[in-house]
Amino acid sequence: MIKTNTIEDSVTQIKMSKSVRGVPLMWVSAYLVDDLLVDTGCDYTKKELEESMRPRKLNTIVNTHHHEDHISGNQLLQSTREVTILAHSLAVPLLKLRPRLYQYQELTWGYPDPSEAYPMANRIETENHEFRVVYVPGHSLDHIALVEPKEGWVFVGDLYITVKPVAARLDEDQWHIISSLKKIREFSPRILFTAVGDPVTDASNALDRSISVREELGRRILKLSEDGLSSAQIMNEVFGEEAMFERIGIRSSYKEFTQQQYSTENLVETFIHEQCYFSTSFPQMKVPSNLSGNEI
Ligand SMILES: [Zn+2]
């Protein structure tokens, strides 16, 4: 299913989700500004996305990162429209390949068809807006954000989901996420256009709180690690239990539902160890460990 929503008169939020018996499983958003589409959702909604784009102008797609819930409308739009797809240079080769997905990813988002993308420059213009392309690793190594400084907009992809994280994948790096949030904060944004959930309208305040909460959490976790506690023990001490969710009648820990890919214990791990030099979807890919070399 798909829902569209206009924000600030000129940004169209396109919310997409696979539905199970009419109930949405997990919303993910793409955004359209002028003829620029940021992300393309999952495989299960690609036809609805393509239909909803038919009456609209579309020239460029930017993928914030290579995860399957952000890129899976690429191929269909590329084969039906004159459109150029742009992404970070690390994402470009991954978009051509079939990822290895966990069962829950297959169930929720499905496999993307391969698509042809090109590396981004550090700026991109549309008819009415000029965007800065900012490299924001942490959630993934190939993550970028689009900043529209005049409007105070940031299209953040999955860099920001909530003020305080409750779970993570092992291929994330929390300290890089904090640095990336600080990079975005420097623009004093008004609105974060997030891929998950609704846009955040007190953006700078939310970023300040999130940076401070994450730094405090990280310091506490590192101290407990230095004291000799294991990640599981730290998880118990700091969070009490694995984060839970309830959806379409299922109540489970994220850890159990995601075959341990996404969990609170992994969140602890990603504060302690640098993990972000591989992707669980592409374990065969070697990516450079020198982050500064990956700036746009
Ligand atoms: Zn992601």
Image (tube, rainbow, N blue to C red):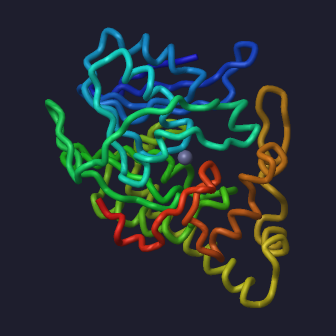
The residue lying toward the viewer, choosing from 35 and 294, is 294
Residue 52: horizontal and vertical position, in percent? 41, 13
The residue lying toward the viewer, choosing from 16 and 99, is 99
Tell me the quarter of the picture where residue 151 sits. Answer: top left
The residue under the point 85% across, 42% down is 252
Residue 1: horizontal and vertical position, in percent? 58, 16
Classify 22 as above or below 120: above
The residue lying toward the viewer, choosing from 205 and 48, is 48
Residue 249: horizontal and vertical position, in percent? 84, 27
The residue under the point 77% across, 42% down is 245
Classify 36 as above or below 44: below
The residue under the point 61% across, 31% down is 111
The reply to whether residue 8 is in sight is no
Residue 199: horizontal and vertical position, in percent? 45, 39
| The C terminus: image quadrant | bottom left
Specify whether 100 is left or right of 53.
Answer: right
